[in-house]
């Protein structure tokens, strides 16, 4: 029997495909194949990237010890002094005190520029030193969480106003304990979580700078 040369009947059409329909079908099949390959390649690329990240995480050494910066306060103050006519405090503190920040800060609310030093004490508590230049009561109140003074004290010949909020149930942030004093046009604010004894150590170290104002 002679082989038929007629194109096969397509069931969906009930007739042979036209050349245009055949071309369209082949094009559609080719597109589906390419799309499938693209998705497959994307999956493999994603898996390969995750594998590389995992290897890096496993081989990079890690430490459970927190990283603590020890800022050169004197060097930073020398650079900042260019922008200020007021002598900036560089307290000479005993071993065990570490500075983790030192910079000039400007309050957008009050427009007050202050020299700030953040200290970690030997007992791993925090005391922040703010030396406000031409400061105002609003700036001071904002630093001390708008708490009220609880007393006064004299340290190394300097009279300080005391803010003791250690027993307060209010959310005062780092202002658990604070000291403030004024010298000329400069206001000094100490605040933090350290003990009164550590505050006294820092206030004593600041006395020479306060006398210069």
Image: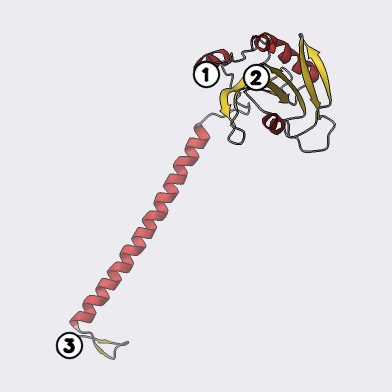
Q: Quadrant of the C terminus?
A: top right
Q: What separation in Å lies between label 3 and label 1 (alpha carbons)?
A: 93 Å
The total number of labels drawn is: 3
In the image, is 50 to the left or to the right of 106? left
Q: Which mark is residue 80?
A: 1
In which quarter of the view is residue 38 placed? bottom left
Q: Which residue is mark 2?
A: 186
Q: Which residue is mark 3?
A: 6
Q: What separation in Å lies between label 2 and label 3 (alpha carbons)?
A: 103 Å
In which quarter of the view is residue 23 placed? bottom left
Crowding at mark 1 (Cα within 10 Å: few <14, some 14-19, many 20+): some
Q: Earlier in the sequence, mark 2 or mark 3?
A: 3
Crowding at mark 3 (Cα within 10 Å: few <14, some 14-19, many 20+): few
**Helix, strand, or loop for circle 1?**
helix
Colour mapping: secondary structure
Q: Who's the residue at 73% across and 11% down the image? A: 204
Q: Earlier in the sequence, mark 2 or mark 1?
A: 1
**Helix, strand, or loop for circle 3?**
loop
Residue 53: image x %, image y %?
A: 47, 41
Q: Is residue 78 above or below residue 180?
A: above
Residue 82: image x %, image y %?
A: 49, 16
**Helix, strand, or loop for circle 2?**
strand
Q: Who's the residue at 52% across and 18% down the image? A: 80
In the image, is 84 to the left or to the right of 27? right
In the image, is 82 to the left or to the right of 137? left
Residue 158: image x %, image y %?
A: 75, 12
Q: Which mark is residue 166?
A: none
């Amino acid at each position: 029997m002679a082989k038929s040369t007629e194109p096969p009947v397509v069931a969906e059409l009930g007739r042979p495909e036209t050349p245009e329909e055949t071309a369209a079908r082949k094009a559609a099949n080719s597109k589906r194949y390419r799309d499938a390959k693209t998705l497959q390649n994307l999956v493999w690329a994603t898996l390969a990237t995750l594998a590389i990240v995992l290897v890096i995480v496993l081989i990079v050494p890690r430490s459970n010890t927190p990283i603590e910066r020890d800022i050169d306060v004197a060097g930073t103050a020398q650079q900042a002094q260019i922008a200020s006519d007021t002598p900036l405090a560089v307290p000479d503190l005993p071993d065990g005190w570490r500075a983790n920040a030192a910079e000039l800060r400007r309050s957008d609310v009050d427009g007050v520029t202050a020299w700030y030093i953040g200290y970690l004490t030997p007992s791993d508590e925090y005391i922040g030193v703010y030396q406000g230049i031409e400061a105002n009561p609003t700036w001071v109140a904002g630093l001390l969480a708008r708490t009220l003074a609880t007393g006064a004290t004299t340290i190394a010949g300097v009279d300080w106003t005391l803010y003791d909020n250690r027993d307060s149930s209010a959310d005062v942030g780092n202002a658990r304990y604070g000291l403030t004093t004024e010298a000329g046009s400069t206001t000094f604010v100490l605040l933090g979580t350290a003990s009164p004894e550590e505050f006294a150590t820092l206030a004593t170290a600041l006395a020479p700078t306060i006398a210069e104002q």
